[in-house]
Image: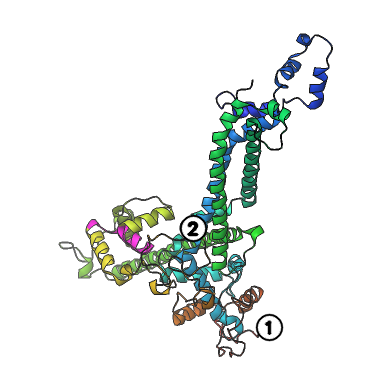
Amino acid sequence: SMRAHDTVLGLDQLNILTLCVPTMDEVKLLKNYPGDKAELATVEQYFLQVMAIPRLSQRISSLVFKNSAHANMEKVNSDYQLVSKAADDLKHCKHFVTVLEGILAVGNHLNGGTYRGQARGFRLETLLRLTDVKAVDRKTSLLHFVVKELQKTSPGVEFLSTELESVKAAAGLHLDGTKEALGQIVAGLKQVNDEVLKAAGADPEQDEEASSEETHDRFRDVMIPFADSADADVEAAQRLASSANDAMKGVTEFFGEPFKQDNAGRIFRLVADFLITFDKVQTDMKVQAEREAAAKRREESLKMRKSKSQAALKKDSNPGSATDTPAGSPPGRAKPAPPGGEPIDLVAAMHNELKAKAPRHESEESPSSKMRRMKELGLTSTSQLLEYDAASPTARKKLIVKTAKSPKHRKSSSVEGLPTVAEGGTSNPSTPRKEGGSGGGQDSPASPFRSPKEGGREPRSPFKEDEMARDLEQEGPWDVAAVAAVAKDDARDEVISRPDSPEQPAAPARPAATGGPPPPPPP
């Protein structure tokens, strides 16, 4: 008889056996073979040994499922756990909401004077086109401007991509494949349960003769404990799948997007693609800042050399000056030049001394490492971290004490643009949060992209209007037509488009950031 045990028949052997099951025609030929069966070849001898086992193919398939079910179940559970975590992280990411509100505020200002300047939100697809909306000089994009402004008002926003690592991982999942894998597990378990019933002789569809032939005590004893355990595991996986689906629906609707069951993970892919652009913009800005700093250093060094050259010429023209003649030297003798005859670059010398005093870190420190060090030191911005690295041990202690006493530091746990406790937020960041949901409630933030009637709140700009307008004018003029086209393409009745009441008059027209008239409303 066949011994159905994991230590005897592993998964590889079982997969081979599935290919070596004799067909009905082969069994019939062997039974009717008139010659000496002992003289048959190896394959036929194998068929003679196994063809007496009832339901051989189905039982081997059940054993294959038993040996592979654990790994397949772990993969399915891992995928759905990641989806739930990504949805929860995205929904509660304060910096991502701040970025969206900043983009909305700038877009509304540029579209001021039209109904597009009163938008409550925008489609997330627009995030992928923000680098195409540029100032007229084509040097600065709308996203570059927003990131630059947010770095002034929202410390830590530069670590957005690190905060949403789970979203980037979830964007790479093939959720249709995960759903199909769970369906295959359910189907495989049903087949196992059917075979257990037949092996126990308890299948109501069996007649007496079939029940007697198909009963297999060893198969039944091995498979019943597995089937009972697998039933509980499958039910848990189905609950996890349902919870993950609800979480995706909740976070999609939280940002005012339509949820489609056949494309449930769309929001993760949109945000992951935006994070790639967001990181690239920050890298571009960093490179540009380094270039500008290097150009400024070269300019200062050139000015200093020019000043020294002029001073040297002045000394040569006044050889009898007392200030230029060392004590005890004959009149008219000039102060000796430094060794090598080259003037000393004081700026470079100070820079080298500062670098020597500062502790050495990797030239390209990761955002997560910076964030971890900032948290350990109680700092709130990368500029403070750079100042700390360059300071002496005594100055570092003073900097930490000064930062701890700063009102800005005391309020760093509350980011502007997000609900307070009274508005549905939570006073304790470690308070457990509910997964999924559509926003609103004690453990879920109020969505700024849904109307208050739906449990949302009004979006709030992270910028001061006058400062934002001034900076827009300095960076502009802007291609307002492109901004208006983006708003028009992404308009929707329930979230963007027009004021709440059709009779409500439009906001009074104000000049756009270009200084010219606002774009005309659409026909």
Can the viewer see residue 342 in this picture?
no
The secondary structure that most of the magenta stretch takes on is helix
Identify the mark at residue 522; answer none if there is no mark: 1
Quadrant of the rendered structure where residue 324 is?
A: bottom left
Horizontal and vertical percent position of residue 31: 80, 18
Q: Amino acid at mark 2?
A: Leu
Residue in the image at 64% along x and 60% along y: 261
Question: What type is the residue that disc 1 sits on?
Answer: Pro
Query: Is 19 positioned to the left or the right of 371 in the image?
Result: right
Q: Residue at x 52, y 55 (%)?
A: 84
**Residue 81, relative to residue 407: is it above or below?**
above
Is 37 magenta? The answer is: no
Mark seen at residue 185: none
Task: Check the picture and name the quadrant holding the N terminus.
Answer: top right
Query: Would you call the spot at circle 1 few (<14 residues within 10 Å), some (14-19), or many (20 or more)?
Result: few
Q: What percent of the width, then of the height, locates residue 159?
A: 44, 60
Q: Quadrant of the C terminus?
A: bottom right
Please provide the residue range marked out in magenta: 377-393
Residue under the image location 62 percent in, 40 percent down: 189
Is 312 rendered above or below residue 513?
Answer: above
Residue at which label 2 appears: 164
**Horizontal side, residue 203 vs residue 171: left or right:** right
- Nearest the viewer among 304 and 434 is 434
The quadrant holding residue 254 is bottom right
Front tag of 2 and 1: 2
Bin the neighbour count of mark 2 within 10 Å (Cα to Cα): few under 14, some 14-19, many 20 and up: many
Q: Position of residue 304 (x, y in %)?
A: 36, 66
Q: How is the image coloured?
A: rainbow
Q: Is residue 40 left or right of residue 482?
A: right
**Does dot 1 land on a helix, a strand or a loop?**
loop
The quadrant where residue 402 appears: bottom left
